[in-house]
Image (cartoon, rainbow, N blue to C red):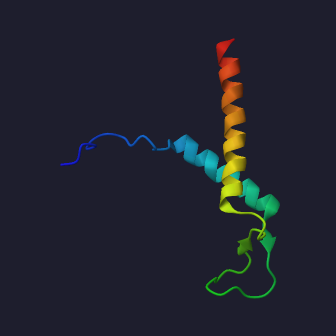
Amino acid sequence: VRGNTGRIPCHAVSVEGIKDVVAFLENYAEDYTILLPGRIPGVRDYGKAKQLPSSVSRHKVYRQYAELVGNILSVKVIYGRY
């Protein structure tokens, strides 16, 4: 039996956190993705096929999200104290 049985992992994300991440990614994709003309291998619905520019990495998107969340959390902490 593992030692973590019945415990929530320390890196678990709440449902609200997941919804925030999904909303951020949808907004980011709406602003920065490129619709490619023609066919894309392995994609059936070409109307929904979007790709990020090659200058944008997953790490860059994560850093922008982390910066945004950090700003939101700092505002919550500031307003929560007063």
Quarter of the image for the C terminus: give it.
top right
Q: Which residue sits at x=76%, y=71%?
A: 54
From the viewer's perspective, tell me whether residue 41 is left or right of residue 6.
right
Name the spot of residue 18 as percent of width and height, x first: 56, 48
Residue 7 is drawn in which quadrant?
A: top left
Residue 77 is drawn in which quadrant?
A: top right
Residue 53 is drawn in which quadrant?
A: bottom right
Name the spot of residue 23 as percent of width and height, x first: 67, 50
Q: Which residue sits at x=80%, y=71%?
A: 34
Q: Which residue sits at x=70%, y=19%?
A: 79
Q: Is residue 28 above or below residue 80?
A: below
Name the spot of residue 55 as percent of width and height, x first: 78, 66
Which one is nearer the viewer's eye here, 63 or 44?
63
Q: Is residue 77 above or below residue 60?
A: above
Q: Which residue sits at x=22%, y=48%?
A: 2
Q: Residue furthest left?
A: 1
